[in-house]
Image (spheres, coloured by chain):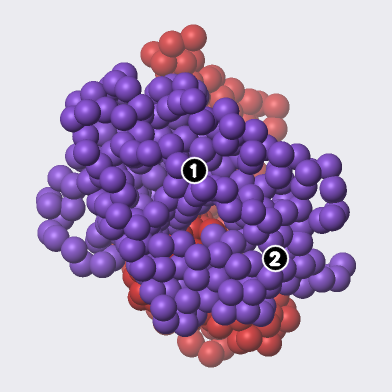
Amino acid sequence: MNTSTIIYWRILVGIGLLGAWEIFSGWTFDSFWLSQPSEISAYLWKSILSGQLLSDMALTFQATAYGYVLGALAGLFIGLLLAQSETIAMILRPYIMAIYGIPRIALAPIFILWFGIAMTSKIMMAAMMTFMLVFFNTYEGVRAADVDLKSVARVLGANRWQLFMKVTLPNASPWIIAGLRISIPQALVAAVVAEFIASIGGLGYRLMETTSSLNTPGTMAGILVLMVVVMLLNTILDRAENYLLRWRAKDQS
Amino acid sequence: MSMARTNAGGGAAAPDRAFQPSIGQPVIELKGVDRVFHSDRGEIVALKGIDLTVCEGEFVTVVGPSGCGKSTVLNVIVGLLDPSAGEKFYKGKPSRGVNRNIGYVTQADNLFPWRTVIENVTFGLEVRGIGNRSEREDRGRELLKRVGLDGFENHYRHELSGGMRQRVNIVRTLAYEPEVILLDEPFGPLDAQTRLNLQDLLMQLREERPETTFMFITHDLAEAITLGDRCAVMSARPGRIREVVEVPLGHPRDVYTINTHSDFRRLFDEVWEHLAEEMRGGDGG
């Protein structure tokens, strides 16, 4: 099948699913639980016009972006640092594994306690989530560096700094980029979860608020917005990753 | 392959090339070198009492039964491994650690997969800070052309065949003109014709850079005799130098026809007898 036929069918499936939802909701089951596409789009339109959607998105994205940058920088720096020394790595290994074992979402309540209900706690949640993923990927990536390639680079005349910049880092880059990539949607989730628990605005706050006032169209609209945002992010990140790692074989040969 | 040369197909001693290697002072000296590897299952003595001297401008080939430690010898010489016992000299001085004057073409291509062909080839010049970017690339391009890889400058490793990768690997070492070049079965993955072309390139390089010293491991006896001024035969493990056979086939050598030289067969048989004995002996008799 060629691409345009596939796209045509994709759109058809989408319309079919939405149509089925619209028809069956309120007929075979109560539309109170699942709402309906027409109600959801009406709600969405309304919140776009009132500016509420935009201000919620702005709050959540701001927290995500600050947290991500903070967490990514810290993760990169500490990951690179710890991977330098075999001894330090050996000593810290069980502790690092233990910290990695903490279900990260479980930290949200205590982060609210530490950092308050305003923006800071959301930034810190996003930062913590990003830090974990970037740190581990960086650390593992550097430690998995190819010994033979390092030897060859030394023979070719590379000094320690050149070895690090021109061999260790690019060799670890698939891991590092993977960490930077998977942590973006995760940072968003972390910020939203923190907003669930206690906050004064944002997409997570709106989800909580609409659900507790039994406003299912509002809840569904919130989920829809998050879904679209994460999908868009993933598409952009896929492209970026493919470009940065273009030196790798497409199919492993 | 486009390897221009003046007298391809000429006789074993072509009249328009007056090259004679000038063998100088010792460059590499190994005296009683042992190398032991420790593993969970005990010790493995890879090398036992290696004595070897290679002089400036010389081309020494190394053959030996598989697993006899040929690659270990090169790893010790370049300094990636230290000898467990014995002495190692470079130009008369004791040497330790990686020796940046020695180039090493490894058996596996070990190309940097994140670098293009031209970026791989210029790596040595780049880290040594020789020339500017365009000068380095001109130099790389010229050598790539000589191994038939013009047009592949911007390819990545995964886009090349095994033979092409190995040619890039060789050029990467040739590019920065080290004083000594060690080659570990460099032509292994190449087809017969490419192999001949590259042997020819090595012979041309000797003429262009007569002070460059070569050590070349191979499992192909004909190749060892074609290229070498001397051929070192190693014993089965633990490896030592069993015999060094002089190869007085003269210069310049035409790799395409040298095997018709009247002494070629005799030298081949001589090296083969040493090797056969080692292979029959098995555990180092």
Label 1 SS: loop
The numbered disc on residue A44 is none
Chain letter of mark 2 equals B
Name which residue type carries label 2.
Leu
A131 relative to B135, above or below = below
Number of marks present in the image shown: 2
Q: Mark 2 points at which residue?
A: B47
Extreme residue toward the bottom, this view: A114
Q: Which of A166 and B185 is in front in this view?
A: B185
Of badges 1 and 2, the one in the foreground is: 1
Where residue A229 appears, as percent x and y from the top left, is 41, 49
Mark earlier in primary sequence (1, 2): 2
Residue B254 in view in this figure: yes
Where residue B191 appears, as percent x and y from the top left, is 50, 24
Label 2 SS: strand
Residue A45 in view in this figure: no
